[in-house]
Amino acid sequence: FPSHDTAASNQSYLDNMEFDFEKLQSVDCRMDADYDDKQPIIVAFDANSNFNCVSIGQTVDNKLLVINSLFVKFDRKLTDLVDDICNYYKTSKTHVVVFYYDQTFVGTVTGVYENQLYVIIIRQFQKNGWLVYDKYIGAAMPHTDKNLLINNMLRGKRKFKPLLNKDNIVTGK
């Protein structure tokens, strides 16, 4: 896999487009050199009323590759974001996702199980034909602990060292 200190574009795929700008309008995972289409993707969402985002990764040799991030805002909601993920990774050979979520995705305003955010996300992935392994992590970490963990990971002092694909961070509709 290419270094995540720089862009991780799949140049051979892009070269095969032969400057057909019509084809280049449709962006998907085949343009990413760091994506392994034989491995599941790992997703973690942040959900709000007007802005929802997701970080997408894969693990390779004790490295957490942050291969993409997407967001939706205003009229587009969580189900639209899941559809965007499924569309971007439509050429996956596995269609398997590992979905991590905390207690903020479990509560519901109406008291109806089907309205819980984690259920909405799982069902939308399934509706798109994906196999979902959901991983409930409990209460969200306090921000100070989270910052310490991230700093230690970036320094290589934890099990996984995160590496970011600069091409795909901060994309969305």
Image (cartoon, rainbow, N blue to C red):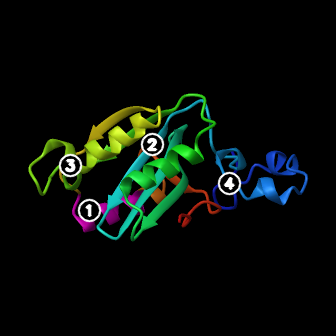
Label placed on residue 23: none
Label placed on residue 42: 2
Whole-Å distance between the Cαs marked 3 and 2? 23 Å
Q: Earlier in the sequence, mark 1 or mark 4?
A: 4
Q: Are marks 3 and 4 in contact (CB under 8 Å)?
A: no
Whole-Å distance between the Cαs marked 2 and 1? 22 Å
Report if residue 91 lies within the magenta region: no
The mark closer to the camera, 3 or 2, is: 3
Q: Which residue is mark 1?
A: 145
- Badge 1 crowding class, 10 Å Cα cut-off, few under 14, some 14 to 19, many 20 or more, is few
Using residue 148 as the reference point, say whether residue 128 is left or right of it: right
Label placed on residue 115: 3
Q: Quadrant of the N terminus?
A: top right
Quadrant in the rendering for residue 142: bottom left
* Residue for point 55% across, 28% down: 94
Task: Please determine whether, in this image, residue 163 is positioned above or below residue 100.
Answer: below
* Residue for point 38% across, 42% down: 124
Q: Which residue is mark 4?
A: 27
Circle 4 — which element? loop
Q: The magenta stretch spans which residues?
A: 141-152
Task: Please determine whether, in this image, residue 98 is positioned above or below residue 112.
Answer: above
Circle 1 — which element? helix
